[in-house]
Amino acid sequence: MHPELLAATSNPGKIEEIRAILSPFKVKIITPQDLSLKLTVAETGATYLLNARLKAQAYHQATGIPVLADDSGLEVDALDGAPGLHSARFSPKENADDADRRDYLLEKLTGKARPWKAHFECTAVLFLPGFGFIEKVGQCHGIIIPEERGDTGFGYDPIFYIPEYHATMAELGPDIKNKISHRAKALSALMPVIASMFKNNNKG
């Protein structure tokens, strides 16, 4: 039986990416929906790391299961790093969706000199009882473009252009995205740690 790891998110896009990125490692990724768990964690931390830790700790306390959590954001140079920690809550529109957030970002960039350099950043946190927190960081650099391109991915992917690939994140497709994205880099860095921690934990 493969060891279980709870993904501390209800975002279907994130869950799909986590499962794909960690597929080489024989671990069963379970979700809050699998456990009929409805948990809202106030992301009050001042950094991605603190928010990821808050989520990891809350989900572990609720289930007792080893947890993988992450916090990520888009940082745009022309906006002094915004939306950053507030990427998922950037639009002032009530019940805003991804498209609303993209529209609001482009509105804020109107009139600012291009290129609009930006990067995605992700801090991934693993919590396994007896080991505490293990954290890794990943970044992906690109530029924001004023028109949406591509129909895969989620969030700001359709307007995040990566010059090396001549494509937006939403045009890359999962095979490439799950190798070069900020989340892929952070989770890939955790993979040997996950393998070692589960191995040692199972010995006990």
Image (spheres, rainbow, N blue to C red):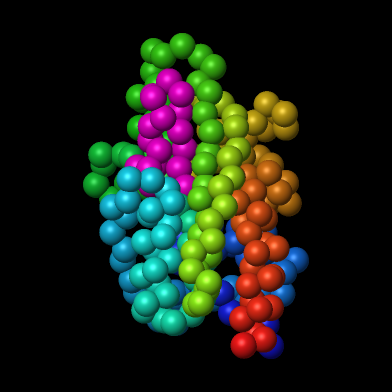
Magenta segment: 72-88
Q: Residue at x 48, y 56 (%)?
A: 70
- Locate the C terminus and report the quarter of the image it occupies: bottom right
Residue 112 shows up from this direction = yes
- Locate the N terminus and report the quarter of the image it occupies: bottom right
Closer-to-camera residue (17/107) = 17
Q: In which quarter of the image is residue 91?
A: top left
**Which x, y percent locates residue 183?**
58, 50
Q: Which residue is drawn at 49% across and 77% down?
A: 129
- Figure check: 135 above or below 7: above
**Which x, y percent locates residue 68?**
52, 66
Q: Quadrant of residue 198?
A: bottom right
Q: Which residue is drawn at 53% across and 39% down?
A: 120
Residue 145 falls within the magenta-colored stretch: no
**Which x, y percent locates residue 187?**
62, 56
In the rendered picture of this protein, how many numbered marks are placed on residues? Answer: 0
Q: Residue at x 45, y 43 (%)?
A: 73
**Which x, y percent locates residue 52?**
43, 57
